[in-house]
Amino acid sequence: MFWYHNSMPASETLHEPERRPANFAWPRRVRLIVSAALVWHLVGLLVGPISSPPSILGDRLQAIYLPYLQAAYLNHGYKFFGPDPGPSHLVRYAIEMPDGDKIEGTFPDRKVHWPRLFYHRHFMLSEFLVGLAGPWEPEFDWDRQPLSPPQEAYVESYAHHLLKKYGGRRLTLYLVEHRLPSPQEVIDGMRLDDSRLYRSRKLGSFES
């Protein structure tokens, strides 16, 4: 008599499937706190854009969000990246050296300030200077507008830094404004670097 043996070799023994832990879920209170923080932050991102130009809603949100916007450096309108960013600004300098030679340069300069982040840092120096302007004086043209006290302080700082960097004797700074061409000018074939798009004003002369 033969007996049927249905046992399997040890190597073929079936194993129980591994038990996977249940999906982790945050407690309801934590989810509510995180969601509220995200909503607060996302609304904060909109405060700057809706405040330029000034608006009633923007002014009210600024009063609530100002400490957070300043701490997170979000208190700007992103206007430069909008459909109508307005003109950009450069700072041009002319340095007289002790031996009589002259050095001229501009910041930012995409041929000199590389990589791109380095260019952007210099671009912020020129735009920050423009942002410090005082109230518009209607009796003066653009190129004769007086500098505000903060502008004077930063212009002097820029000048002394450049004089020290190059070892110059005398330096003159200029603010160059580069406006965007109008749609019609683009249709007419005007290039972005057309000389008619630039205007310059003297910021001051300084000696080492």
Image (spheres, rainbow, N blue to C red):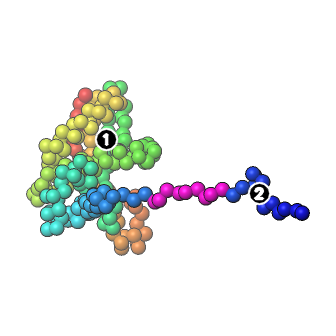
Q: Position of residue 29 (x, y in %)?
A: 28, 59
| The N terminus sits in image quarter | bottom right
Mark 2: give few (<14), some (14-19) or many (20+) Cα within 10 Å. few
Residue 154 image offset from top left, x and y in percent: 22, 40
Q: Residue furthest front?
A: 1
Q: Residue at x 49, y 56 (%)?
A: 21
119 part of magenta stretch: no
Q: Work out whether residue 108 or residue 82 is closer to the camera in this orientation and state it.
A: 82
Q: Element under label 2?
A: loop
Q: Which residues are magenta?
A: 15-23
Q: Count the marks: how many?
A: 2
Please say if 96 is above or below 5: above
State the residue at coordinates (81%, 60%). 5
Q: Is residue 18 magenta?
A: yes
Q: Residue at x 27, y 41 (%)?
A: 173
Estimate how packed mark 1 is, as few (under 14), some (14 to 19) or many (20 or more) residues with alpha carbons within 10 Å.
many
> Which marked residue is nearer to the observer: mark 2 or mark 1?
2
Of the residues shown, which amino acid type is indicated by label 2? Answer: Met
The span from disc 2 to disc 1 (Cα, nearest Å) is 89 Å
Q: Residue at x 27, y 38 (%)?
A: 158
- To which residue does mark 1 refer? 93
Disc 2 marks which residue?
Answer: 8
Q: Amino acid at mark 1?
A: Tyr
SS category of the residue bearing label 1: strand
Q: Quadrant of residue 197?
A: bottom left
Report x, y in % for residue 19.
55, 57
Give the residue at the far right of this rendering: 1
Q: Closer to the N terminus: mark 2 or mark 1?
A: 2
